[in-house]
Each structure stands twice: as structure tokens, then as C-alpha cells.
Image (spheres, rainbow, N blue to C red):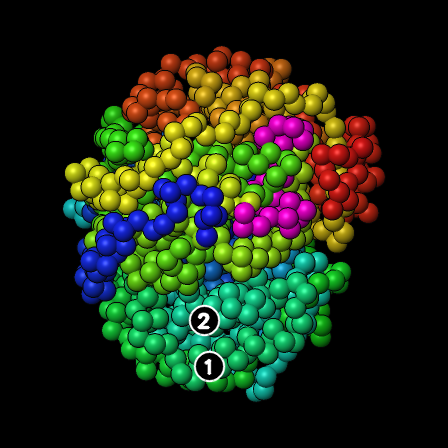
Amino acid sequence: MRRILMSGIAAVALAGFASANPAILAAQEVAEPAPLAELVEKVDIPYEQFTLDNGLTVLVHTDRKAPIVGVTTYYRVGSKHEPRGRTGFAHLFEHLMFGGSENVENFDIPLEAAGSTTTNGSTSFDRTNYVQTVPTGALDLALMMESDRMGYLLGAISQEKLDKQRGVVQNEKRQGDNQPYGLTFYAILEGLFPVGHPYRHSTIGSMADLDAASLTDVRNWFIDNYAPNNVILSLTGDIDAETARPMVERWFGAIPSGPEVPEVEAEPTTLAAEKSRVMVDQVPQARIYRVWTGPALTHPDAEPLRLGMSVLGGLASSRLDNVLVRDEQLATGVAAYSYQSEQVAILAAQMDVKPGVDQAVAEARLDEVIAEMIANGPDADELARAATSLVSSEIDALERVGGFGGKGSTLAEGLLYTGDPAVYKTQLAAIAATTPARVTEAMQRWMTRPVYRLAIVPGERTESGATMGGWGDEATTPVPEPDAKEPVEITRTGPPRELPTPEPVGPLTFPAIERAELDNGIEVVLARRTAVPKAVISMQFDAGYAADGAARAGTQSLMMDLLEEGTETRSAVAIAEEQERLGASISTGSSLDTSSVTMNALTANLAPSLALMADIVRNPAFADSEVQRVRDQRLAAIAQQLSSPGGLASRTLRPLVFGDNHPYGSVGGLGTVPVVEAIGPDTLAREHDRWIRPENAAIYVVGDVTMDELKPLLEASFGDWQGTGEPAPAKTLDTATPPAETRLVVIDRPNSPQSVIYAGRILPLTGPTPGLEALDLANEVLGNGFLSRLNMIIREEKGWSYGARSGIDAPDGPRLFTVSTAVQSDRTADSVELILQTARDFADGTRSVDATEFNRVTDGNIRGLPNRFETNRQVLGAIAENDDLGRPDDYYVTLPETYRAIDAAAIDVAARDYLGPENLTIVVVGDRREIDAQLERLDLPTTYLDVDTGVSNAD
């Protein structure tokens, strides 16, 4: 992927909490879940199809819910088509496709100025795709630009562009390798497939092969694979085939067809005998895998295996969860899945062994649970729950017209892999019709073959990701020579073409907002949207992990996690099973200032889903056994966070800048080991009583339901919930913070190929401070976006990182300005200097906002507003944020007017006042053997921290 820039009540409880509400139980008893076949019928993406004379296939789906169009382009080439010595090339070429073509100097600038979002690309084993979602009036521009790089790229490729993107991709690889368990997928591919198998090498490739890629390779790859007859163009949204055809013919019709991408022989492999491997990595706990290859996407066993693996380890109520995590507590986390590609699948089950548990005992039990599942298969209820969950997730995907996983991708992938854009219907029908016997048969066919056993165990990492991911014969065959950078004649290949001017956009249509109040005073906020037969309901409480402060870090979020782990009338397993039967998804969590219980439910099952949600909110059991289990999982999660470079940096910054006494001076929601170890049921019950109560709550709903339908259901579930009448505890957000100063804080992480840099400073502003839109736009210029200065310099110009960004949060209290990136180790100090200089140049006027930047962040944002509210969750988040920050309901409707009133001078003033480099606390996590000498020359006050040091007490 091209972009990742840097998401039992105690006996003393009140009567309102003390027992399950009979109305809730009654609602659950009388309302039956909607039949699965009825849900399957709701998944429908009508389309029209046509093909140009040059072989370009076009799919068009009309969806008029918003004035936007998804432009999704699939090329029939991926990493499985790469020759030996050029692994990673398909993905590297994807990056080059964004570097400009003969008539388009930069692919991103015109599109973002026109309001495009999700402008991105990705590469898999089987294909390369490119996605944009644009305002309807910018479709002509998007088609021109997409056609220009399809037909006329070679005249714009240069050695400089190749070298820069090579550096970016290599840092993308380093960033992935640098994570805990970051070498795992390499090891899985090496264990399953023989040398030379098309699925044997990783999509990212090896460092040596990336170094070897040349301009000649670029030219040949383009000529051999990027012709229109190897492409599917999917247009979805505010468009129809009659309108689309002449536009497509105008821009793509003259591009000549080319060679067909050759088919690749790539059968699933069967190991001759069981195979085992142990990898030592800098991880806090052992992770165990059992892996097999599986069949092609079109094989009749594909869907039964998908369901079987879901029952084994995908559902919240899965076999592995129930046995290994809940009952016997041998593991802190499990999973099982079918990772499906076009010609093969990877069937995997995994387990994180609980610290202190004998690994051999845990592995033996894992094998027993898998063997029992293979021998006897799922029961009918398990299978129905897995099928309902899968269909419900497919309904969610209907909300997005474009982007990864949107309707455009669904149609294009169906045609690419099976010849049928509507194959999703066949797949869903197969899921609905699959029997337990059919799942058992498929699992026995594929998972009784020899297994690959992989264990990632704690220790010092000795293997290097740089040499992994390639063809696999590097130990016996010399790696290719690095790119000699021989001159290649670059000439235009097509005529000059002018970029179309996007048409004006109309006023933003934001859903009408209705407000009501339950009998007990809880506010209800509804925005009705009928695009999909679902609703998102979020009950939000003014709490968050700021309610803990540093002294109690982790208490609030652990309490919220326990809500789903049993009520007075339902066990944790019963809660999970009931969600799955209903096709609902309930999540609990805590952000900085808000604790919430959020549900995504089918409207056909809304009554029983709300009854379940209410029981979770109102009647948690906090059973001692469940508290102990979840507490152990939390301790393991803290250890995982401490093993991650990004996790270390994020835990460190806030305590340093806010201090111990401020509510925001916490390590974050996971908390600290001493605090979590001391938490028991009574602590959690008191925490629930203090914060989770009706006078501290609001309910937000977005979806296919009216207020007349919704309010009686909410009254039945929550209306008789009585609080104490007293105000909720106050968070003292004006607590004094430590004096700010520019300083370095360094944390050693040996063997890290990259350094994570995370810098921050408190601003003299709070989230609700009005009139800060100019600051938001200034931050976009500096670092919030792909085209921002920090990202363009550190990533695109220097090639030192996969991405850099800045951010300004908007909490209830003081705002925090941050800058973050992960850079190759030998450029750590250079990157810190560049961050400081870039911020300084903007703040002191050395480099004021220019006309291109100004147009992008003002007019581009205005044009892109409809793209920001495609899904129910996006709309709900916007409404809740408006309430949190004291904004009016029509804030986004009037935002274009606000942006138009902002001039360049206002953006420069905001940068001057708030975005300078002064008084930044700069946390660096990296290998001190590589970075200490570099950092010394920065001549900044420096503190060195151990991983387990209390960061707020550092000297």
C-alpha cells in the first residue's frame, strides 16, 4: 500500500443497577433475529458493463445518495507475476504511478484540490489497484489523470523518481519489519511454499531486489502489464453508464491495447511432512501458528473453509476463544482465518501464550481444539452465527461507493478473479446454504494434510527482515547487482492533453438532526440515513481515560472492557453468541475524554440488539474470574505496547508534557502494570457507579430508523434507568502543567532498523475554543495530509520514511500539537533537524503558505466535504464532535462559508502563533548504538529512559 501516514454490581450498588430490567429481557424474548436469507437479499450492487475497442472493461453502478463517484482501477498484475531477482517490483511500480505522467506533473495535487479523498493504491499477490473518490464534477479530471498514467507514463519516468520511491518502499519495509512479530509473514510464506512458487515471495520483496530495480525494468513492466486490455475500471456512485461511456471513450479510447498478462501456474502446495520453525524476536510473549495452504477463491471449498475458520477462531465466541482464552486461560489472544488469494488460500490458527503458562502445554491444547474441530465440525448454531456475522459485514461495505473495500472494489474483484462482477451474490448464497457437514468435509480435506508449525518466542532478534521476503534461494544464488543507473532515453509517447477544470460543487447536504429526551433525561440525537438497513448507536459518557489521571491509569478502560464480559443474566460467551445471531457488533472503549458503548446493528434486529446493549451497559457482573482473566489480557497488552516502537513513544509523550497531576498526563488507556495488577471487582463496580450513569450519558444514532420507531425502543431499554441525581465527578482540566522546553528523550530499542520520532507541545487552546479553522488548515499545510510539507520533504523528497505527519487534537481540555514519523536509523538526527526547520520556516514567514497549498486546503476541503460523510459511523462521529466542542448542528453545512472567509494571511498567522518548533518535547525510540552519535550534534538537553522507567519521573 502506498500510504500509511502517520485509532456483578457490588452489594452496595444503587437499585437502578442492581437487577436486570424485565422490559429488556422481555424485548429479547419476543424479538427473533431476521432470517439469514432475508439479509442476503439486501446485499445488491446493480451494475452495467461495457468494453472499449482496446479491451478496457468498465463497470458502472449508480448510487445517488451523495454527489461523489468512486473511481477504482484494477490491473491484472501483482507480485506473483514478478521474475526472480525483482521481488517487490509490482509494489514499487505502484508507487511510481503516483509520481506524474506526461501531462500530469503530480498525481495528487490536482485531485486533492478537486476534493478527492482516499487517493491511494495497493498491491497484492494477484493485482494492483488504484482508488479515488471524487466529487461528481471532478470525475472528468479523475478519468483524464487515470488514463494519462495508463497510456503516457514512460515519458515522465526518471532515475531520480525511481531512486526516491525505492527509498520510500524500503522504509515501508523497514517500518513493517520493525514491529513486534514483524517477520512472521515472511516465515509463513517460506514454510508453506517452495522456492519459485509465485506466492512464495512477499509483496514488499527483499532489499537486494529493490536495490536492483532499474529504469529498464520500469519500462518493460509498464509495456508488458499496464495496457487497457489488462484493466477493469469501476465507476460507482453519482454516475450512470450513459453518462460514463463517452467520458471513458474520450480519455481511454486512444490508448492502444498491449500484451495480455500471462496466466501464472500457482497450485496450493502440500508439505511432504509436518514442518516446524522457531523464530526468536523481541516480543513479550510466544505466538504460535498452525498453517496450511488452501484452495483457490473459485473452489467450492473456499466459503465452507471461511466459515469453518470463523467458528474455530474468528468469532468472539469461537472455539479457540472459549477454550484457550476464557475457560482454561492458556492464551491471551487467539485467531483463525482463511487469507484468500486468487489461486491459493492460507489457512491459519494462532495463539498468544499467556505469560507464565508452559508453552508446550498451550501448544498441545491448541492442537487438540483444532483436531476436534476438524474431526467433528461446527454445530448448526455456530455456523448460523458465523454466516450472519459475515453477511452483516457485507451489508456494511455497501455504504462506501469507492475506496478499498467499497462497492467499486467488490465489482472489480469479482470480474477480475471469477469473470462475474456479481459473484458476491453467489458467495453469500453459498454461505447461507452451507451445512455443518459441508464445512467439516472441507476442513478435513485441507487441514488433515501436514501442518506448518511456527513459533515466535521472546529473545533478541537475530534474523533480519532486509534479507527476507525474496525468491528464497539467496543462500545458494548470488543476489542481483544493484541498479547501475545506466542512462535511458526518456521521450514523450503521447500528445499534449489539458487537464479538465472541475465543475463547481453544490451546497453540502448533511442529514437532518433530530433531538429528543428519554423519561430519565438522557438526550437522544438521531440522523436518519437509509442507504443500508443498519443503524449505529453510540452511548457516550463524559469520562474517558482522563478520568484516571496518571495515578489510576488503566482503570476506566479496563472497566469498559469488562462490560462485555458478563452481566447478571448473561455470560461473556452468551453475549458474544447473541451478537453473532443478531448480526450486531457491540464495542466498548475509552478515548481521552469519552467512554462509550457503540453498536452497529441490523435495523430488522434493532429491538433485541438494543436490549442486549442495555444489559451490557446497565448490569455488568464484574465476576472475579472474568476480572482476573481480562486483567491478565490487559497486562499482556501493555507488554505488547512496550515492545512496539510506536507504542513506547505514545506512552511516553503525554506524561512528559502534561505531568503527573494533569488528567491528560497518563500513559494512555492501557494503563500501567502496578495499577492494573491492583484492580479488582469492587474497584470496577465503584468506577461504573461513578461514571456510567444516565445523568452523564447521551445517545447518538445514525441509520435507517425514525425517531418515532427509535424512541420507544430506547425507553424500553434505558428509560427507567435511574441515577443518583448528583453530577458526575469533575475532571480538573485546568491543572497546571510543567514548564515547556525543547528537549530530547531517547529510549533504546536495540536492533531497530528505524527510529520512531514523536514530538509534542501543549497549545494555549482547548478543544472548544472557537474560530480555529485557520489553524486546522495551517496544520494541513505543515503535516496533516499526504501533500503536507513534512510528508513531502521527509518521504517524497528525501526518501527517509514511509510517512510523516503533524496533528492537533481537540479534547475537552488543552490541545496537544504533535509531529510523528518513523525514519531509517541513519537519518534520525537529520529528520529531527528537518522537522524543526520545516516548522520554523512556516512559523517565521520564511516559507508562507503558497497559492497551490492555499487552494488545496480551502477549495479542496470544500469540494471534499461530501466524501467525509459516506458512512453512518462518519456522520455519528461528526455529530458527537460538534456536541463535544459546542458547535451548532449546521456546522458542516456552513463550513464552506467559513473556509472561503479565510485568507492566506490568516493561515500564516495561525502557523506563527501555534506551529513553531519552540518547546517541543521530542521522543526518539531507536537503537542507541546507531543514533546516539547523531543526536549529540543536535545539542539539545537529552534524557535517556529505560523501557520500564516511570517516564514522568525521569531525570
As drawn, is 101 to the left or to the right of 953? left
The kind of residue tagged 2 is: Arg
The residue positioned 61% from the left and 22% from the top of the image is 735
Is there any visible trace of residue 111 in the rendered image? no
| Magenta segment includes 798 | no
**Magenta stretch secondary structure, dominant:** loop
Q: Identify which residue, 509 or 792, lies in the foreground.
A: 509
Q: Residues within 10 Å of mark 2 (few under 14, many from 20)?
A: many
Q: Position of residue 939 (x, y in %)?
A: 81, 28
What secondary structure is found at the residue carrying circle 2?
Answer: helix
Residue 437: quadrant of the picture: bottom left
In the image, 264: left or right of 633? left
Q: Which mark is residue 319?
A: 2
Residue 739: which numbered mark, if any?
none
- Residue at image coords 23%, 53%: 27
- The residue that disc 1 covers is 372
Where is residue 399 shown, x and y percent of the image? 29, 47
Q: Residue at x 30, y 62 (%)?
A: 581
The amino acid pointed to by label 1 is: Glu
Foreground of the two, 769 or 597: 597
Seen as rendered, the residue at the extreme bottom is 272
